[in-house]
Image: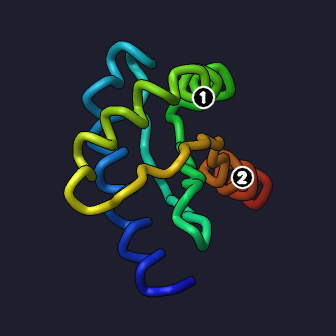
Amino acid sequence: MSTRQNKVSKQVQKDMAEIIQHHSRKIAPGKMLTVTGVRISADLGIARINISVFPSAEADKIVGYLNMHVSEFRNELGQRLRHQLKKVPELKFYLDDSLDYIDNIDNLLNK
């Protein structure tokens, strides 16, 4: 990953975290949404955003909601990045279930 990709990835992660936090009451009341990582393509055209949901009940539904309303989030991200990027990357949200995986391993070890 190039230095430019790293910088853009970190900035997108920071801005998307703020955007999702701002909308979290509407998206998933009573749940904590976290942007755990952003991977950006080499041409800076696609951003793959990993979202962690706690508690994880209905996590797939929440990620589905984010993907259905991606144009709204991309527009808001564009407002924040308008002086830094010529083109706002396409956004794709994915569920980061690493917390569930860790919890499952922990439960298995404690049996």
Q: Nearer the viewer, residue 26 or 53?
A: 26
Q: Is mark 2 on a helix, strand or loop?
A: helix
Q: Earlier in the sequence, mark 2 or mark 1?
A: 1
Q: From what the image shows, is residue 105 above or below residue 70? A: below
* In this rendering, position of residue 93 left or right of residue 28: right
Q: What residue appears at the point 72 percent right and 56 percent down from the top-left corner?
A: 110
Q: In this view, does 39 lie above or below 22?
A: below
Task: Locate residue 89, reporting x and y percent.
Answer: 49, 51
Q: Crowdedness of circle 2 by 10 Å Cα count: few (<14), some, many (20+)?
A: few
Query: Viewed as shown, does residue 75 lie left or right of 81?
Result: right
Mark 1: which amino acid?
Answer: Asn
Scheme by which the image is coloured: rainbow
Q: What residue type is labelled 2?
A: Tyr
Residue appearing at x 51%, y 86% in the figure: 2
Q: Residue at x 44, y 48 (%)?
A: 35
Q: Is 74 on the left-hand or right-hand side of 99?
A: left
Q: Which of 95 and 68 is in front in this view?
A: 68
Q: What distance separates the C-alpha of mark 2 from that of mark 1? A: 23 Å
Nearer to us of marks 2 and 1 is 1
Q: In which quarter of the image is residue 59?
A: top right
> From the image, which quarter does the N terminus lie in?
bottom right
Find residue 60 and report its image quarter.
top right
**Left or right of 19 on screen, residue 57:** right
- Evaluate whether residue 44 shows in this view: yes
Label 1: which residue?
67
The label shown at residue 108 is none
- Residue 101, label in figure: 2
Nearer-the-camera pick, 80 or 16: 80
Spot occupied by residue 31 in the image (x, y as percentages of width and height) = 43, 25
